Image (spheres, rainbow, N blue to C red):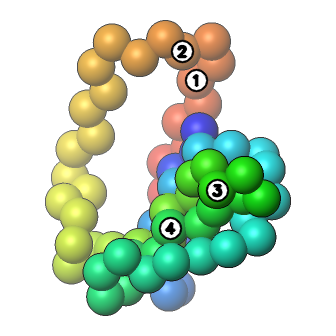
Amino acid sequence: MKLNYYQDTDSLYIDFSEKVSVDSYEVLEGIVIDYDENKDIVGIDIDNASRKIEFKNLTLNRLPFQNQLIISA
């Protein structure tokens, strides 16, 4: 899983899978869910993310990490 924030467009993309998105559905204004060929969620795109998400803190609880990489802006 990857969280990618794009400051120039103020969008956050959450990758759940390496699979290719073949379909998308906007569930709320500016929030799009991407699906693979099996209708599994592969990602979520959030436009105007800084207005919808509080970026000050990120807390991850009890996740079974094998690898962790943090790149700070």
Per the image, the residue denoted by label 1 is 68
- The reply to whether discs 4 and 2 touch (Cβ–Cβ < 8 Å) is no
Residue at position x 64%, y 56% from top? Answer: 39
According to the picture, the residue beneath numbered tag 4 turns out to be 33
Kindly state the secondary structure of the residue where label 4 is placed: strand
Determine whether label 2 and label 1 are within 8 Å by CB.
yes
Q: Name the residue: 26% across, 57% down.
A: 55
**Closer to us: 56 or 37:** 37
Residue at which label 3 appears = 39
N-term mark: 3 or 4: 4
Q: Element type at marker 1? A: loop
The answer to whether residue 25 shows anywhere in this view is yes
Tell me the crowding category of disc 2: few under 14, some 14 to 19, or many 20 or more residues within 10 angstroms, Cα based. Answer: few
Relative side of 34 to 59, left or right? right
For the residues labelled 4 and 1, the Cα–Cα distance comes to 24 Å
Q: Is residue 31 left or right of residue 45?
A: left
- Residue type indicated by callout 4: Ile
